Image: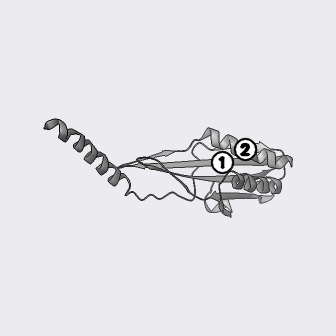
Amino acid sequence: MAFSKSPLKKVAVLLLALAVSGCVTIKVPKYITDKNPYKKTVLSTYDDVLVATRQALDELGWAVTDVTDPGMYEHNRDEGEGGKQCLIFTETKEAARILYSRYTTINVYLRALKDGTEIEIRYLARRPFLFMMSETFRNDHLIKRIFEQIERGLKK
């Protein structure tokens, strides 16, 4: 008799865990601080890089939600050559997993330089699980694909 109750207990515990983990609300910030940013300088004009960056994000499935002056968020940053700089925000993506969901977003900071444009990409992933929350600021594979897509857009 004890053997037959054991599988029921396991199923009950699993269902309870699924119910508890599915009831999490999470806030993903629009602005990502510069923890572990990815930086690259390209020898193209600021305007060309801005167009190529927006196209690259769109082609990779990241909808741009806002382009703004980084001065609202970045207080100690040097302005670009001629004051040309912007901060691009993307939508927050949700990827459902078996016991949790992952929420990711990207910020791209562009700054005109004397001989090109600096591209800084910031990535944030949050994974709530039961009563814990993990954050990741790195995704080397995704950021490499974004940089490659920007470079292809600049060659057109």
Give the residue at mark 2. 147
Name the residue at the left extreme.
Answer: 1
Residue 72 falls left or right of residue 127? right
Q: Who's the residue at 57% across and 45% down the image?
A: 35
The answer to whether residue 41 is seen in the rendering is: yes
Residue 63 falls left or right of residue 85? left
Residue 115 falls left or right of residue 36? right
| Residue 79 percent coordinates (x, y) | 73, 55
Q: Are marks 1 and 2 in contact (CB under 8 Å)?
A: yes
| Residue 37 percent coordinates (x, y) | 62, 44
Cα gap from disc 1 to disc 2, whole angstroms: 9 Å
The kind of secondary structure element at disc 1 is: strand
Q: Residues within 10 Å of mark 1 (few under 14, many from 20)?
A: many
| Residue 29 percent coordinates (x, y) | 53, 58
**Image quadrant of residue 71?**
bottom right
Residue 74 vs residue 76, the one in the foreground: 74
Q: Residues within 10 Å of mark 2 (few under 14, many from 20)?
A: many
Give the residue at mark 1. 121
